[in-house]
């Protein structure tokens, strides 16, 4: 389902394929049938990561994902990186066929989407708590949707704390949003290393160390984590040392996916479908199984 056709197909074939889909979905729309939506904006965040803003109004929970691509190219699961009535933002790292193709899309171009799918962050359940967002690299993208939700429902939550780690200053995404969050909330950003000839006066070192050094306690707090599995495991170890319980920790898991709706079995983590039961799990639901398949 995901990789309908490898390699870059001819433009006339692509045009034929896209004609078979109606823009906006029309009568064909169902949970599994993609529809075409227009790109409102393309923004390059870093050398290998970009954000597409889609002219698509759809109800969703922060942390849910969509299957995005183009007929004849394939599709990829990508987390929604916004919370808006007007658009859907997707922040995408270029790693292969689909993501490199999507990087060529500009304002007015069409992409295919289906979803939103999966279980996101249970934001209602966090009412009255302080929220801690911990992200690494493009793992910050799904957290941005949850942050925008919390800002929209500001009176539901107490403090917002953020800990975001990037490989280098050149890999820092969402620069404008980070400036806003720095003023409004408790923002901590760190980079693993600074290449020579790079001007940067922020924190250097793994984000795990900033979390370890912080004065966070577990009193009426929940933590949302998204990033590379090794980072998530280290962060959870530190949170446990600080007294956090498993049911205060929510992680976003990644698995290879095809159908996205619990039919093909590709995304199983020990009896759970990442696409349908996740991608967001409470830590006690998948503890010890995040690296298993
Ligand atoms: C629920 C979910 C949410 C995601 N959200 C985002 C997001 O917000 N932004 C983003 O940039 N990426 C996200 N991803 C990862 C993204 O789906 C893959 O990078 C993408 O499908 C790669 O497609 P491709 O055709 O460009 O690369 P391919 O040519 O298919 O693969 C390139 C390389 O990436 C590896 N790869 C492909 N998919 C995955 C995966 N799911 N996990 C680990 N390695 C993979 C392949 O094994 C291969 O080595 C998410 C994945 C899941 C499951
Ligand atoms: S991707 Fe098919 S069951 Fe999850």
Image: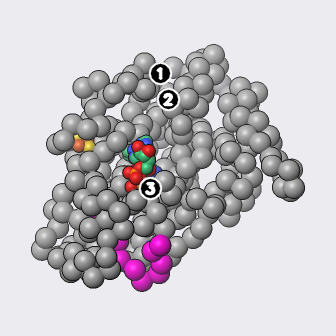
Q: Is residue 165 above or below residue 246?
A: below
Question: Going by the picture, which residue comes out furthest to the left?
Answer: 27
Q: Nearer the viewer, residue 210 or 131?
A: 210
Between tags 3 and 2, which lies in front?
A: 3
Whether disc 3's CB lies below 8 Å from ligand 1 is answered: yes
Q: Are marks 3 and 1 in contact (CB under 8 Å)?
A: no
Residue linked to disc 2: 249
Taking the spot 23% from the left edge, 49% from the top edge, the residue there is 259
Residue 96 badge? 3
Pointers 2 and 1 in contact (CB under 8 A)? yes
Residue position for label 1: 246
Image check: 60 left or right of 147? Answer: left
User: Residue 142: percent from the left, percent from the top?
Assistant: 48, 50
The part of the chain drawn in magenta is 104-114
* Mark 3 or mark 2: whose residue is earlier in sequence: 3
Q: Residue at x 63, y 57 (%)?
A: 173
């Amino acid at each position: 389902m995901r990789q309908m056709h490898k390699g870059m197909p001819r433009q006339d074939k692509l045009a034929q394929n896209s004609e078979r889909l109606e823009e906006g979905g029309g009568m064909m729309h169902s949970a599994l049938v993609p529809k075409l939506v227009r790109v409102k904006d393309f923004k390059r965040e870093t050398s290998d990561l970009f954000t597409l803003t889609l002219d698509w109004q759809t109800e969703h929970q922060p942390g849910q994902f969509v299957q995005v691509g183009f007929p004849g190219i394939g599709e990829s699961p990508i987390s929604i990186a916004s919370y808006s009535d007007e658009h859907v933002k997707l922040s995408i790292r270029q790693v292969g066929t689909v993501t490199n193709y999507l990087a060529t899309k500009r304002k007015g171009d069409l992409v295919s989407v289906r979803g939103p799918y999966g279980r996101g962050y249970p934001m209602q359940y966090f009412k009255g708590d302080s929220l801690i967002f911990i992200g690494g690299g493009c793992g910050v993208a799904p957290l941005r949707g949850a942050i925008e939700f919390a800002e929209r429902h500001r009176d539901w939550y107490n403090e917002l704390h953020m800990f975001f780690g990037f490989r280098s200053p050149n890999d820092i995404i969402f620069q404008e949003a980070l400036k806003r969050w720095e003023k409004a909330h408790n923002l901590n950003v760190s980079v693993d290393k600074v290449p020579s000839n790079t001007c940067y006066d922020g924190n250097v070192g793994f984000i795990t160390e900033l979390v370890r050094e912080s004065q966070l306690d577990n009193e009426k707090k929940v933590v949302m984590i998204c990033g590379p599995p090794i980072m998530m495991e280290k962060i959870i170890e530190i949170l446990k040392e600080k007294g956090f319980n498993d049911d205060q920790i929510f992680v976003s898991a990644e698995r290879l996916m095809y159908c996205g709706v619990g039919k093909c079995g590709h995304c199983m983590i020990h009896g759970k479908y990442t696409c349908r039961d996740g991608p967001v799990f409470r830590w006690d639901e998948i503890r010890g199984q995040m690296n298993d398949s």
